[in-house]
Each structure stands twice: as structure tokens, then as C-alpha cells.
Image (tube, rainbow, N blue to C red):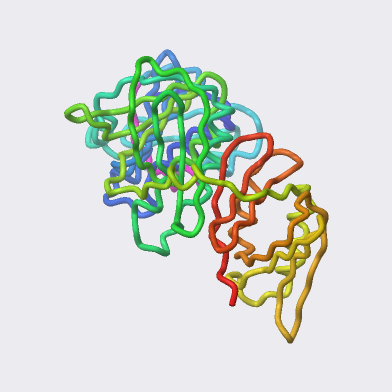
Amino acid sequence: MKFTMDPADLKEAVRFALTAMATRPTSPIMGGILFSATGEGVTASGSDYEKVGSLTVNADVSEPGEALLNGLMLSKAIGKFRSSKPVTVIVEDKKAHLSQNAVKFNISAMPAEEYPRDLVGNVRTVGTIRGEEFAKLIRSASVSTDNGAANLPELECARVELGQKLAIMSTDRYQLSLGEIDWEPVEEMSHAMSVHGDWIRSVAKTVAGHTELFIGENNGEPTRFGVTSGPYSTSVTLTAGKYPKIRSLFSNNDADACDYNLKELTGAIDVAAALLDDKNTPVLFEGQDGETTVSGGADEADSKATLTGTLEDTFRFAVNPQRILSVIRVTDGETIRITPNGNKPLWVTSPEGGTDHLVMPVRLP
């Protein structure tokens, strides 16, 4: 196998393949990136059995073929290609030779024939979507996935629903997010799938323009969900488990809302949380006559900031600053809307529409 390509393309192909690979592979073979060189370019693929990722990039292929190279070792090597001049890769006699002018690396090749095939299985395209809108939805609606602290795998997932709309939701039990957008399904369907939050957030970094969504099935039930956008393709095995029924929690919001300038609110929370010695210590919101004070701290040290809101009524609630900032920072627009509702969850959204969030307040004495 022999090909020449732009070093930036080679680095991106390796980077993307590594996103689907385990940090600690189960075997040396699964620590490898499979390269396939054809007349259409070079495809780099990686997998940890559950995730599969591949990227096809342009290359001048003089000798088609396949090669399996250690991903981490390869990543270290190509990181040393500093110039923009083409990189040549030659694989022969169980060795890969990489060169760019005077910089040369030799890496042992693993047996490509031992790499598992058909990891994705039989899949079918179920619809298309605009990549930019999909990425925006992912970033905002997957923000509430659990970080693993709850030790509940289903809460580390985002829930993807495919129907008349494409919806994504997430929760760690203390905050919830739900967003949906239009898409173009190939047929009427109703699927609900749990995919790991880290995986779907990585999807948001590569989708753009025309994007296809596909699923793999077993006996008519989805078992895999994937995305192809341009030269990027990635998929993941669905996570089993009963996902919390959170959609109904967004259906009742009768309390009056308060609109704030998003930057001013972010700044006020940052000030109120500046002297807290524990990131889980809440900040206190107190509103009256269109003015809100956000404060934090105790006898030893405290801080507060005041800003203008649109709600004239009196309200008071406490909330974890990191939680409310996490949803504020994925909200677009200049204005953000918060609905205080006693000890019930705070409804946080943009007046212009988009993803809705619920954040549990901290109960006041």
C-alpha cells in the first residue's frame, strides 16, 4: 500500500478514528486504526466494538491496499509533521514507513486480516437533517446527562426520539433538557433510543450540511444508531435500560417567567459563586419589583450582584450555580427566561424557542 496526502487530512483521519476507540483496548488489534486505500481516497477506521468511526480523505493512491497501524503510536508520529508538505505512507514487509522530507518514521504493521469486519452490521438510512441544526440541538439538549456519579448507565445517555420531529433529551435527575427540530424521515416511524452522551456530543463536532441518520435493527427493533455527514461516519450500539419518562414534566408551566439579559445573568451568577468553597453550595435569587439580587457565601465571606429582570412579583429560590450555568451556556440569543416556581423545578429557556431545561432548586429552610 502506498499513498501521499496532505498532513492535515492524515491527522484528522487519525484523530477521528481514535474517537471511536477505547482508551485501554481489549486487545492490541483493537488498538489499531485500519487504513483502506482505494482509487476514491484513504479511509481510516477505529472501533471499540460498540462505537465505530471512519473518515475518508483525499489522497494520491499509487498502490491500493489495507494496513492496520497502532493508533496512539501513529498519532504521536504524525504530530511531528510540522510543515504543510505532503506525507507519504508506504506499507510493505509488515512495516509502515511515513515520511515528510527529512522527517521519517517506521512503525510495525499489525495483521489487517485479524481486524473484525462488519462491526456496523446491516443498517438502513432513516432520514436526513441539516448538520448545523443537528449539532446545535445536540449541544443544548445533551447537557444534562449524568457524568457517571449516579452509576446508572442509562442516565449517562441522551435519549434520541425519531418521529415527526427529531428530539433529544437528557437528565441526571437534578436537571433535565428537551429539544426537538424538524428533519426529513424516509417514512413514518416512532423510535426511541438511548445513546451515550459522550458519543453524541462528539457527533456535534463533525456534522455539517447534508447529514444522513441510520439505524441497525434486530427483529424490527433498533440496536444501533449512526450518523454520516460528508466524509465522516460514526455509529454506536444502543444502551439498554429503562429511560426516565421526562417528557411529561415539560408539559405544565403556569408560573410567571422572568427574562434576563443572558450575559448579565451569567456575570451575576459568577460573582455570587466567586467566594463559595464548594461548587455544590447554592446561590440565592431574590426578586422584587423587576430587580433580582443573586448572592452567595456565608458569614466568613459573601458576594452578590444585582440585575434587572422583567418579573415584578416577589420570588426567592436557591440553585446550584454550576447546574444553572450549564444550561445558560448552551442557550442561544441575548435573552434567557427563567420561571421561578417555589420548590418546583426552574424552567430555563430562550424566549426565541429552542431547547427547554428544568433545574431542581435547592430547598430553602
> What residue lies at 54% left-to-right and 22% top-to-bottom?
130
Q: Which of 127/356 is in front?
A: 356
> What residue lies at 52% left-to-right and 42% top-to-bottom?
141
Give the residues drawn in magenta, as a range: 65-75
Query: Which image quadrant: the N terminus?
Result: top left
Image spot of residue 279 (x, y percent): 61, 70
Q: Residue furthest left?
A: 219
Q: Which of 320/363 is in front?
A: 363
Does residue 117 appear left or right of residue 174 in this picture? left
Does residue 151 appear left or right of residue 268 in this picture? left
Image spot of residue 292 (x, y percent): 78, 60
Q: Quadrant of residue 131?
A: top right
Residue 90 visible in image: no
Query: Which image quadrant: the C terminus?
Result: bottom right
Residue 96 higher or lower than 57, as above or below: below
Q: Which of 51/298 is in front?
A: 298
Q: Assess whether residue 9 is covered by the magenta stretch.
A: no
> What residue lies at 38% left-to-right and 42% top-to-bottom?
195
The mark total stands at 0
Q: Quadrant of residue 209?
A: top right
Image spot of residue 268 (x, y percent): 77, 60
> What residue lies at 74% left-to-right and 70% top-to-bottom?
295
Residue 235 higher or lower than 335, as above or below: above
Residue 334 visible in image: yes
Does residue 97 appear left or right of residue 358 in this picture? left
Image spot of residue 19 (x, y percent): 45, 42
Q: Assess whether residue 67 is covered by the magenta stretch.
A: yes
Q: Which of 60/334 is in front?
A: 334
